[in-house]
Image: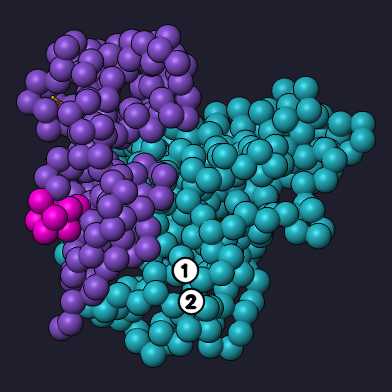
Amino acid sequence: MSRIHVSTTINGDDVDYLCEAGDTLLDVLRDQLDLTGSKEGCASGDCGACTVRLDGRLVCACLVLGAEAEGRSVETIEGMAEGEELHPLQRNFINKAALQCGICTPGILVAAKDLLERNPDPTEEEVRYWLAGNLCRCTGYDKIIRTVLETAAEMRGAA
Amino acid sequence: MKFETPQTVEQAVALLAADSGARVLAGGTDLLVRLRAGHIAPSAIVDIKHIDGMGEITQQADGGWRIGAGVPCAAMGEHAGLVADYPGVVEGAELIGSTQVQGRCTMVGNLCNAGPAGDSVPALVAAGAMVRVAGPNGTRDVPVLHIPTAPGKTSLAKGEFVTSVYLPPRGARGGDAYLRFIPRTEMDIAVVGCAVNVILEEDGTVACAGVALGAVAPTVLLVAEAAEALIGTKCDDAALAACAAAATAAATPIDDKRGTVAFRKDVSGVLARRAAKLAYVRAKGD
Ligand SMILES: Cc1cc2nc3c(=O)[nH]c(=O)nc-3n(C[C@H](O)[C@H](O)[C@H](O)COP(=O)(O)OP(=O)(O)OC[C@H]3O[C@@H](n4cnc5c(N)ncnc54)[C@H](O)[C@@H]3O)c2cc1C
Ligand code: FES
Ligand code: FES
């Protein structure tokens, strides 16, 4: 069967690829485009390790077809740093050790960045609800939530 | 498997009518899970989101709302006018899954998936919402209540799909609410869900009401006796108790690991009472 030709934008760059109808966006990112920052934890929408932004909305890349990205804009963890300059969330996750194995981290960073762009001053409860679809088996969440809140405060201070 | 992106309703109907193995794709949060798990093997996936109007929420000339079948639930919560008129419908829709699931899932997908516990369905039923169905013989408007027929089954005929949901005009004194019971606070399937919609007379008496239960029968239940218990009252304690008793009596749940029959029947009454009270307070606007 002929493969589907897709033209899309990923982290601001025009990208073309060929995929099967059943390939997910996550398959395409990881297996074809070497964008392996997005992780596959469950492939069923439960864990959030594959979180990306599609036309400005957070989605699970494992629940989007590669073919659906035609003409749309995809933002992944690979687009979060500006060159060598880490995003404050990335820098603080490292400095404050808000990660252990790191499998959940790209998805959490993408989701947390989206939250802070929508709401620069979220409450702890808002952060916890926003990230309820991002599972972490290692940290117990506390450092993650605190680091997001502290980064939000730091970014408000800098603005 | 083919991937189709029809640009018009007619093209989508033609694709679905010509191929009984084709499946409609909205947000994909049910469909892609089942596809990846190997539970379904469609011959084609028909993505309806490119059709005009699918992504839109619009207030109609009569004051009612039309919500396109491709609107992600997150967009409903961002729509101030819809939230003001139908907070209960929006809270049901926003209970589905996580932030990431919200970015994709639709109410129509929730409805057509026909799971007994679909969170967005009871509030639609309580509000008397209709869906517009397009098919080989044109379009028809169908009460939401009549779409699911059994777990995983709908009344849609071959070649048909839902293009939008319609919510009736809110009027001056109406309100609704949806509450669900789950063992956690997020990301779980309803053990019981209950929605109540009320419209009041000028003096605060309930003129009309709808009470719907989810997860306690093969399909969503519209409980007329529970609504009748509220009509003609000001949702005083006696009316709320009668409404709760009617909801408990109407529930026909199953025993499973998330709840026993007795527990689910009891919770049906508790949620009916609380949702009725909340809907009433919202309708009064205080
Ligand atoms: C992690 C996770 C958590 C979830 N949590 C919840 C929850 O808390 N509560 C809940 O109720 N659900 C939950 N769900 C299930 C799912 O997200 C919802 O049922 C959702 O509303 C489905 O909408 P969709 O647009 O993604 O549907 P899709 O997956 O696109 O479609 C679902 C079904 O409906 C059919 N369909 C879709 N649109 C149409 C149409 N316009 N006309 C005819 N048929 C159509 C499809 O062919 C398919 O069979 C969860 C799912 C995941 C992955
Ligand atoms: S891999 Fe997508 S949510 Fe787990
Ligand atoms: S750091 Fe290991 S899963 Fe979160």
Q: Are marks 2 and 1 in contact (CB under 8 Å)?
A: yes
Magenta-tinted stretch: A26-34
Q: Chain letter for purple?
A: A
Q: Is residue B56 left or right of residue B159?
A: right
Question: Closest to the observer: B259 or A95?
Answer: A95
Q: Residue at x 53, y 45 (%)?
A: B75
Q: Secondary structure at mark 1?
A: helix
Residue A79 placement: quadrant: top left
Q: What residue is shown with label 1?
A: B50
- Indicate which disc residue B58 carries: none
**Position in image of residue A76 (x %, y %):** 25, 43
Chain assignment, label 2: B
Q: Name the residue type under label 2.
A: Gln
Q: Is residue A81 left or right of residue A41?
A: right
Question: Closest to the observer: B5 or B137?
Answer: B5
**Position in image of residue B204 (x %, y %):** 86, 31
Q: Is residue A112 left or right of residue B26?
A: left
Along the polypeptide, which appears first: circle 2 or circle 1?
A: 2
Residue B38 in sight here: yes
Chain assignment, label 1: B
- Indicate which disc residue B7 carries: 2
| In the image, the residue with mark 1 has its CB under 8 Å from the nearest atom of ligand 1 | no
Mark 2 residue crowding within 10 angstroms, few (<14) / some (14–19) / many (20+): some
